[in-house]
Image (cartoon, rainbow, N blue to C red):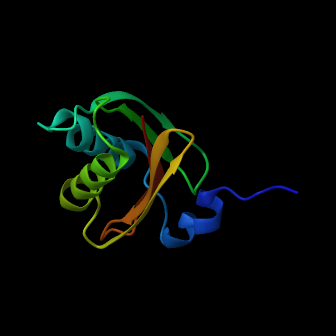
């Protein structure tokens, strides 16, 4: 029996009703996310590690970052959620879910722009 991943259960691709961001649109989102999560001045010691694009419509982009050792999961979750809502997600639509799995905080997201294109993905924080 195969257990569905949380992304499959959430089925975020259902929210990409007009299409998914590709090319320069997805690159622009990647840049905004990198700057907003780990390059802006922050008090949680966030360092960007890498990013990876996927062909999976439920998770098109994975960002990985490392936080200071003395920062709790709750502080990481609060920080990521604040940055997501204030600086990264498109204003027209967003949905996210946060969970801790195997000593990693995973922030799953979907957002859609006014042009109808959208991005699904996750941020893996350690």
Q: Is residue 94 left or right of residue 2?
A: left
Choose between 95 and 116: the one closer to the eye: 95
Task: Kindly give the residue lying farthest to the right in the view shown.
Answer: 1
Above/below status of 42 relative to 68: below
Q: Could you say where residue 58 lies in the image, as x and y percent from the top left?
A: 57, 57
State how many labels appear: 0
Task: Kindly give the residue lying farthest to the left in the view shown.
Answer: 41
Above/below status of 90 relative to 124: below
Q: Could you say where residue 25 lies in the image, as x and y percent from the top left?
A: 35, 49
* Residue at x-position 35% and y-position 41%: 27
Choose between 78 and 112: the one closer to the eye: 78
The part of the image, by quadrant, that contains residue 57 is bottom right
Q: Quadrant of the C terminus?
A: top left
Above/below status of 96 relative to 48: below
* Residue at x-position 48% and y-position 58%: 20
The part of the image, by quadrant, that contains residue 82 is bottom left
Q: Could you say where residue 11 lies in the image, as x and y percent from the top left?
A: 60, 67
Q: Quadrant of the N terminus?
A: bottom right
């Amino acid at each position: 029996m195969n257990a569905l991943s949380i992304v499959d259960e959430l089925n975020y691709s259902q929210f990409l009703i007009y299409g998914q961001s590709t090319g320069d649109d997805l690159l622009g989102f990647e840049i905004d996310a990198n700057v907003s999560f780990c390059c802006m001045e922050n008090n949680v010691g966030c360092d960007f590690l890498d990013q990876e694009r996927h062909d999976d419509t439920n998770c098109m982009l994975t960002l990985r970052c490392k936080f200071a050792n003395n920062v709790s999961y709750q502080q990481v979750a609060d920080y990521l959620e604040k940055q997501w809502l204030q600086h990264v997600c498109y204003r027209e639509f967003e949905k996210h879910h946060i969970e801790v799995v195997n000593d990693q905080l995973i922030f799953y997201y979907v957002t859609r722009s006014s042009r109808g294109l959208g991005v699904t993905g996750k941020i893996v924080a350690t």
